[in-house]
Amino acid sequence: MNKEIHQHSNLLNITNLHANIGDKTILKGLNLQVNAGEVHAIMGPNGAGKSTLASVIAGRDKFTVTQGGITFKNKNLLNLSVEERASEGVFIGFQYPVEIPGVSIAGFMRAAVNEQRKYKGLDPLSIFEFQALMEEKQKLVGLTDKLAGRSVNEGFSGGEKKRNEIFQMAMLNPDLAVLDETDSGLDIDALRVVAGGINAFRSKHNAIIVITHYQRLLDYIVPDIVHIMVNGKIIQSGGKELALELEKTGYAEYE
Ligand SMILES: Nc1ncnc2c1ncn2[C@@H]1O[C@H](COP(=O)(O)OP(=O)(O)O)[C@@H](O)[C@H]1O
Ligand SMILES: [Mg+2]
């Protein structure tokens, strides 16, 4: 395969996306193209619709797409279920991760990894293969065996939830990861660990969209492209310097 073409292959293509919750329009004509090998940052004030965008990409059904479309690896993403999207290689780390009482991280991940393998026509991992994968990926974010044995997100601190999120991402090895406010509530040490896990995951073959209100995270995860999202659409895009400008001016001039 031509390496040049492969490196620049389009993963996600969002055109003129409009989405509602109930009868309230939140996304109002959003365009975004993400290629393999790229890290994009989406920044914007509270209420801009950043988390809504993550939910629409994930396929959460409380949001309705009323106009425009999303393709992922040239497939119409909007025709796929939440599970199919995940199996196709879309991972969403939510701002407010759900708790799953009674299901351990290890058990949850084993089911998730094997479901994805089944979708791809692969045999499930043996318990030994799975444990080896767990160990390798746990190290990335310093997730302990004790934490991996606990119910998913139940009683986790903010830092533990975000570590778990990056661990899950590393286990599933998606083509596209959308990380919503991964930096929120993290002290500087936890931020470094989480950013280190994200950077280790970064490759020519995948893409990451980092959603963040603050510039701070981007000191650790240096984006290729920065977008400013206001009132349901992207109003400006640029290089990493755009995030630094924004840090100085704030969002006031965009609102
Ligand atoms: N479940 C919901 N019900 C009603 N309105 C919602 C819901 N979720 C989000 N919104 C509204 O959608 C808008 C965008 O929210 P959100 O996507 O969370 O923005 P951001 O992540 O950029 O802060 C806000 O005005 C918010 O109040
Ligand atoms: Mg949000």
Image (cartoon, grey):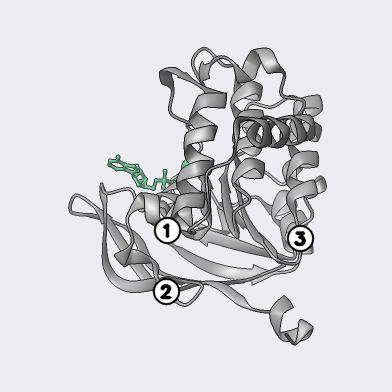
Q: In which quarter of the image is residue 65?
A: bottom left
Amino acid type, residue under disc 2 in the picture: Lys
**Measured Cα–Cα span from mark 3 to mark 2:** 22 Å
x, y percent for residue 59: 35, 53
User: Residue 200 location, x and y as percent?
Assistant: 80, 47
- The mark that comes first in sequence, 1 or 3, is 3
**Mark 2 secondary-structure assignment:** strand
Q: Nearer the viewer, mark 1 or mark 3?
A: 3
Position of residue 117 relative to residue 99, above or below, is: below
Q: Residue tagged by mark 1? A: 231
Instruction: Please name the amino acid that badge 3 sits on.
Output: Ser
Query: Percent x, y for residue 43?
Result: 60, 53
Query: Residue most toward the left?
Result: 23
- Which residue position holds label 3? 203
Closer to us: 166 or 33: 166
Can you tell which quarter of the image residue 240 is in?
A: bottom right
Q: Secondary structure under badge 3?
A: loop
The disc at residue 25 is none
Q: Can residue 218 be seen in this snapshot? A: no
Above or below — where is 107 with respect to 35? Answer: above
What residue lies at 48% left-to-right and 31% top-to-bottom?
97
Q: Is residue 93 left or right of residue 215?
A: left
Residue found at x 76% / y 60%: 203
Callout 1 touching callout 2 (CB < 8 Å): no
Q: In terms of image quadrants, where is residue 18?
A: bottom left
Specify few, some or many for label 1: CA neighbours under 10 Å numbering under 14, 14-19, or 20 or more: many
